[in-house]
Image (tube, helix red, strand yellow):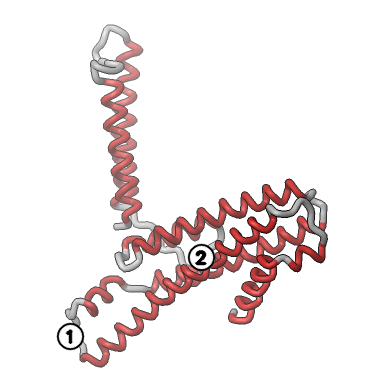
């Protein structure tokens, strides 16, 4: 079971317990089901009923209902990417990597928001400079999510149980086949590591771009293209298109 599901389920159940303690404990609100007030009794009964419903729904949702695995071809929104990546957190080989990838997505959103804010301080929405910067940011985000799509495909295919058997020497196949299988799985692991580094490089380029932007009060068209960070981003995008 994915770790994030366990965490959410524990948080939900603790929330139910704490809520009931606050409302029914004599040290806090002290509601009584058979108190003198009919309203108090009705409120207490409603809280208990809602607690039972939320408890059953939440635990069934987190522990019994299985999420549909999102394939690379089904990725449409940013939330789809986050769900598809989180679904693989149960694969212990990638658990730390997956949390890092999710953090990278958050960092990308934050950096893009800051850069857009800085751009609007220097340009109007109609200015060509703003339009060019916005177009570059869109391309760099597309490249970032292209890497994510590739990672989702690899994570979905990776069979943690089989990998554990291979590395644990529990297979019944020949040493040659076992070694070939191990190499295949190591390639998956290496691919994920390299893809994380690629996206980290994208985030670094955005940091450099933000730093350079902060140095200028205004920029002409020619100066925009000549910015070192912009040149590096253009090169990064060009290389990505070449390998697609």
**Disc 1 and disc 2 in contact, CB within 8 angstroms:** no
Q: Nearer the viewer, residue 144 or 47?
A: 144
Residue 157 visible within the image: yes
Residue at image point 68% right, 67% down: 228
Whether residue 31 is visible, yes or no, is no
Q: Is residue 229 above or below residue 235?
A: above
Front one among 230 and 166:
230
As rendered, which of 238 and 1 lies closer to the eye? 238
Looking at the rendering, which quadrant does residue 186 occupy?
bottom left
Question: Label 2 belongs to which residue?
Answer: 200
The first of marks 1 and 2 along the sequence is: 1
Residue located 76% across and 51% down the image: 217
SS at mark 1 in the image: loop
- How packed mark 1 is, by other alpha carbons closer than 10 Å (few <14, some 14-19, many 20 or more), is few
* Vertical relation: 106 (above or below) 176: above
Circle 2 crowding by C-alpha within 10 Å: few under 14, some 14–19, many from 20: some
Q: Secondary structure at mark 2?
A: helix
Residue 212 as seen in the image, left or right of residue 192: right
Residue found farthest to the front: 215
Q: Which residue is mark 1?
A: 172
Q: Nearer the viewer, residue 68 or 116?
A: 116
Q: Position of residue 149 (x, y in %)?
A: 51, 68
**Percent x, y of residue 82:** 47, 57
Which numbered disc covers residue 36?
A: none
The CA distance from mark 1 to mark 2 is 40 Å
Residue at 66 percent across and 76 percent down: it is: 238
């Amino acid at each position: 079971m994915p770790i994030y599901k366990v965490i959410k389920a524990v948080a939900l159940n603790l929330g139910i317990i704490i809520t009931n303690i606050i409302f029914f404990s004599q040290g806090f609100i002290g509601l009584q089901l058979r108190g003198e007030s009919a309203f108090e009794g009705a409120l207490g009964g409603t809280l208990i009923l809602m607690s039972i419903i939320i408890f059953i729904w939440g635990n069934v949702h987190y522990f019994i209902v299985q999420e549909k695995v999102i394939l690379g071809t089904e990725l449409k929104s940013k939330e789809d990417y986050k769900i598809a990546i989180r679904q693989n957190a149960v694969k212990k080989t990638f658990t730390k990597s997956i949390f890092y990838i999710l953090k990278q997505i958050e960092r990308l959103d934050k950096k893009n928001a800051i850069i857009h804010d800085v751009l609007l301080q220097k340009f109007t929405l109609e200015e060509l400079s703003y339009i060019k910067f916005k177009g570059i940011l869109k391309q760099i985000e597309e490249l970032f999510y292209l890497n994510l799509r590739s990672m989702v495909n690899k994570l979905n295919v990776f069979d943690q149980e089989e990998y554990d058997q291979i590395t644990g020497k529990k297979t019944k196949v020949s040493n040659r086949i076992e070694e070939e299988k191990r190499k295949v799985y190591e390639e998956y692991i290496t691919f994920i590591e390299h893809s994380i580094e690629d996206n980290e490089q994208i985030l670094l380029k955005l940091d450099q771009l933000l730093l350079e932007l902060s140095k200028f009060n205004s920029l002409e068209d020619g100066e925009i293209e000549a910015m070192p960070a912009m040149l590096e981003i253009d090169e990064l995008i060009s290389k990505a298109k070449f390998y697609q």
